[in-house]
Image: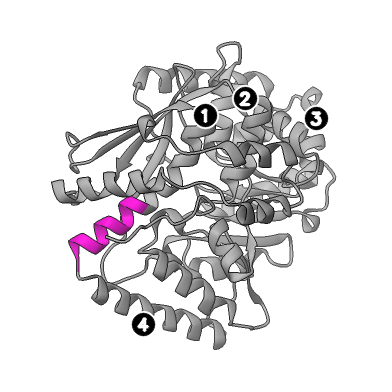
């Protein structure tokens, strides 16, 4: 099979925004990441597993070119010291551990410094997806159905069925293929309709290639590792530690905070006046988007911040219909924006894979995500989940309504 990942830029933009801060503040942290396929009816054959391993070997041969580094250096929040680090950086195949004893027939773990292992997540998922769909199905048939559905999406935008406001393409990790993702971005870029505007893609390589903005700030790993990977930290304050480190690195730049790593209610205990002012907005990734949006508006108003000055970025399993409903509901009250992934990059006649690569250990300690709904987390130690929940419950019981936290 052809090389699937052709550039080290071919990852999500937030890997660079987090990576720079990891390099400057947490370069000694070590993490373990674990792959999981959530689909119950998927099996990776031995031939698929070997091709996935081969593709990851090819990925580990890549280096940043000077042209690619010059492109990154022109992004206003990226610093020269990080560019110099990336000039020396390379993926290490030795950090990967493969197996076949999972129900789906594939296990992947990466072990090493957070600087390294964080960078592997997105390329690995893109590789697994493309290998699977090219080897399990007639790829040409899938691509044909993909193109047909893309045409329907574009027609829906043009005839006013869809009104998406400002939206970005977030589909790299679960795309059908590099070919399909690029086709979708290029086609959607040409659709110029009032009320709908494709403003960027999370895929930095594709953003450079298409002349569009790379979009992304932070992921759950950021809050999990900083808040839970240090034994001196109370994990119920994970958001405070993570937001504090982010502001130290970026000030008011690159400011979209992720709310649901240990539940949005706990996040709001730390997202008080200073952070709510400094960050340009917040991102939704689990739970009812309408209830979450109302909660965020109420929170901004309680801090005497005009919600219309803030962006609510919705990114949880969206399609154009859901995004349109959310946009029309909130557009006169805040700045709604949307990150839409699989629906753009892997909408075909067969179901997309639901695969993830999550941090499971940081500095030898268990870490976990507690989203606003059950089922999106991943932790190898159930006892740690109970501990984390108890810490959060204690904090919420003892700090709700405590105005001394409004700093």
Q: Nearer the viewer, mark 2 or mark 4?
A: 2
Mark 2 vs mark 3: which is more N-terminal? 2
User: In this figure, which residue is indicated by the disc labeled 2?
Assistant: 26
User: In this figure, which residue is indicated by the disc labeled 4?
Assistant: 148
Mark 1 vs mark 2: which is more N-terminal? 2
Protein image colouring: one colour
Cα–Cα span, label 1 and label 3: 32 Å
> Is residue 251 on the magenta stretch?
no
- Magenta stretch: give its range: 127-137
On residue 277, the disc is none
Cα–Cα span, label 3 and label 4: 51 Å
User: In this figure, which residue is indicated by the disc labeled 3?
Assistant: 406
Cα–Cα span, label 4 and label 1: 41 Å
Task: Reply above or below: 241 against 209.
Answer: above
Cα–Cα span, label 2 and label 3: 27 Å
Q: Viewer-proximal residue, 173 or 103?
A: 173
Q: Nearer the viewer, mark 1 or mark 3?
A: 1
Res. 372 in view: no
Callout 2 touching callout 4 (CB < 8 Å): no
Callout 1 touching callout 2 (CB < 8 Å): yes
The residue sitting at 80% across, 39% down in the picture is 251
Q: Is residue 303 left or right of residue 152?
A: right
Which image quarter: residue 228?
top right
Crowd tier of the residue under label 4, counting other residues whose Cα lies within 10 Å: few below 14, some 14–19, many 20 or above: some
> Is residue 136 on the magenta stretch?
yes
User: In this figure, which residue is indicated by the disc labeled 1?
Assistant: 114
The residue sitting at 32% across, 71% down in the picture is 348
Q: Locate the N terminus by quadrant.
A: bottom left
Cα–Cα span, label 1 and label 2: 8 Å
Label 4 SS:
helix
């Amino acid at each position: 099979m052809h090389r699937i990942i052709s550039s080290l830029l071919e990852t999500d933009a937030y890997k660079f925004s987090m990576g720079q801060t990891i390099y400057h503040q947490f370069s000694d942290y070590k993490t373990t990441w674990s792959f999981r396929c959530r689909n119950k009816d998927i099996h990776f054959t031995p031939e698929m597993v070997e091709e996935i391993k081969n593709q990851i070997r090819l990925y580990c041969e890549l280096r940043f070119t000077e042209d690619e580094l010059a492109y990154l250096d022109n992004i206003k929040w990226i610093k020269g010291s990080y560019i110099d680090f990336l000039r020396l950086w390379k993926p290490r195949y030795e950090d990967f551990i493969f197996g076949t004893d999972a129900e789906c027939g594939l296990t992947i773990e990466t072990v090493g410094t957070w600087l390294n292992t964080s960078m592997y997540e997105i390329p690995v998922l893109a590789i697994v997806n493309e290998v699977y769909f090219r080897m399990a199905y007639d790829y040409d048939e899938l691509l044909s159905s993909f193109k047909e559905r893309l045409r329907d999406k574009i027609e829906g935008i043009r005839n006013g069925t869809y009104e998406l406001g400002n939206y970005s393409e977030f589909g790299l990790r679960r795309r059908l293929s590099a070919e399909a993702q690029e086709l979708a971005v290029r086609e959607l870029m040409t659709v110029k309709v009032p009320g709908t505007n494709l403003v960027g893609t999370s895929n930095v390589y594709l953003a450079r290639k298409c002349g569009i903005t790379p979009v992304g700030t932070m992921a759950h790993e950021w809050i999990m590792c900083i808040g839970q990977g240090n034994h001196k930290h109370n994990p119920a304050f994970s958001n405070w530690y993570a937001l504090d480190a982010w502001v130290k690195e970026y000030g008011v730049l690159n400011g979209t905070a992720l709310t649901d790593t240990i539940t949005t209610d706990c996040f709001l205990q730390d997202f008080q006046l200073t952070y709510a002012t400094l960050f340009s907005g917040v991102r939704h990734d689990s739970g009812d988007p309408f209830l979450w949006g109302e909660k965020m508006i109420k929170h901004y108003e309680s801090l005497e911040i005009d919600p219309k000055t803030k962006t609510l970025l919705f990114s949880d399993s969206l399609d154009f219909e859901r995004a349109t409903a959310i946009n029309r509901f909130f557009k006169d009250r805040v700045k709604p924006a949307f990150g839409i992934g699989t629906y753009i990059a892997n909408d075909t006649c067969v179901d997309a894979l639901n695969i993830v690569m999550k941090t499971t250990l940081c500095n030898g300690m268990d870490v976990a995500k507690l989203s606003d709904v059950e089922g999106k987390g991943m932790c190898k130690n159930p006892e740690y989940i109970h501990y984390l929940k108890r810490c959060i419950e204690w904090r919420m019981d003892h700090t709700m309504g405590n105005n001394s936290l409004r700093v």
